[in-house]
Image (cartoon, rainbow, N blue to C red):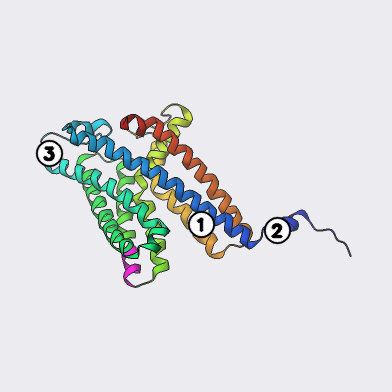
């Protein structure tokens, strides 16, 4: 009887379930820590740019990046812009607190009330964003992608509330993560655009008004790609064996490194110059 074992059988024997689980869990922790760092920088940028312009009384400073920001003679639209940006700062911090397990486990009452504020903010910011998109902008791929993001946020928020009210907590938590990813679409879009610029050292195929082919892809990918990756992760977590979990953990770690590099490029190219 032969003692020979094929190499793939030996490799499978090394990939034990505890090892695969540790790598998969570690990749999620790594992803979340990078997201926290990146979104805190984003929140600081919002506060510095828009808060600084407001405190100094220079409301035209809001138009440094917005094509349709503060417009003379449009008080209603301007008020919506202020609400939208203010809530963007609030929801960024609230979302990070909501997904942090230590906060959820140690302060459940805060978690519940912060969740309600987060959901309400998500709904309001989406409705305001949809109104601004269709009253101040033309009809293009960017506007379609923004509208898709807003509609998905509203739909996913409804599912998140439903599963919380019916006490299906595990399902509620998964929908809450989906909501967080959709709400973070604007943040992901900035990472994709400025990561792309940093990679190529030029706005290759982005167009003058983010209407080039690369920009069209990024507009939709910022909404759909993170959730698609999360859905794959859920399938692996629920059904895959040790090998599948190991592969998912390594893939998620690699994607997180790409995201970290994009955060660095976006910070250097966009956020830091406007904060300093």
Q: Which residues are magenta?
A: 159-166
The N terminus sits in image quarter:
bottom right
In terms of secondary structure, where does tag 2 sit? helix
In terms of secondary structure, where does tag 1 sit? helix
Q: Residues within 10 Å of mark 3 (few under 14, many from 20)?
A: few
**Going 50% across and 41% down the picture, which residue do you hit?**
258
Mark pair 3, 2: CA separation: 65 Å
Horizontal arrangement in the rendering, residue 53 relative to residue 196 (left or right): left
Disc 3 + disc 2, Cβ < 8 Å: no
Depth check, front residue: 222 or 92: 92
* Residue with the mark numbered 3: 74
Measuring from the top left, give residue 260's x and y in whole percent: 47, 41
Q: Earlier in the sequence, mark 3 or mark 1?
A: 3
Horizontal arrangement in the rendering, residue 110 relative to residue 257 (left or right): left
Mark pair 3, 1: CA separation: 45 Å
Answer above or below: position of 71 versus 244: above
In terms of secondary structure, where does tag 3 sit? loop
Residue furthest right as drawn: 1
Answer above or below: position of 264 versus 99: above
* Residue with the mark numbered 2: 12
Q: Main secondary structure of the magenta part?
A: helix
**Going 27% across and 35% down the picture, which residue do you hit?**
49
* Residue with the mark numbered 1: 233
Would residue 35 be counted in the magenta stretch? no
Residue furthest top as drawn: 201
Horizontal arrangement in the rendering, residue 69 relative to residue 237 (left or right): left
Image quadrant assignment for residue 170: bottom left
**Residue 219 visible in the shown view:** no
């Amino acid at each position: 009887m032969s003692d020979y074992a094929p190499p793939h059988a030996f490799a499978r024997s090394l990939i034990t379930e505890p090892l695969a689980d540790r790598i998969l869990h570690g990749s999620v922790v790594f992803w979340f820590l990078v997201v926290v760092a990146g979104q805190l920088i984003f929140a600081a940028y919002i506060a510095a740019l828009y808060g600084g312009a407001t405190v100094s009384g220079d409301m035209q400073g809001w138009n440094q990046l917005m094509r349709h920001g503060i417009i003379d003679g449009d008080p209603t639209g301007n008020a919506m812009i202020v609400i939208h940006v203010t809530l963007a700062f609030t929801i960024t911090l609230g979302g990070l607190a909501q997904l942090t397990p230590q906060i959820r486990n140690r302060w459940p009452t805060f978690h519940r009330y912060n969740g309600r504020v987060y959901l309400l903010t998500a709904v309001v910011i989406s409705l305001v964003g949809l109104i601004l998109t269709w009253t101040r902008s033309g009809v293009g791929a960017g506007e379609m992608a923004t509208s898709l993001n807003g509609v998905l946020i509203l739909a996913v928020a409804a599912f998140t509330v439903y599963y919380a009210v019916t006490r299906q907590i595990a399902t509620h938590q998964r929908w809450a993560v989906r909501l967080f990813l959709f709400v973070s679409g604007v943040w992901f879009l900035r990472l994709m655009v400025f990561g792309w610029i940093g990679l190529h050292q030029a706005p290759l195929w982005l167009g003058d008004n983010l209407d080039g082919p690369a920009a069209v892809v990024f507009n939709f990918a910022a909404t759909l790609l993170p959730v698609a990756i999360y859905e794959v992760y859920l399938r692996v977590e629920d059904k895959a064996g040790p090998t599948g979990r190991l592969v998912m953990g390594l893939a998620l770690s690699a994607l997180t490194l790409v995201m970290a590099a994009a955060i660095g490029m976006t910070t250097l190219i966009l956020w830091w110059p406007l904060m300093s």
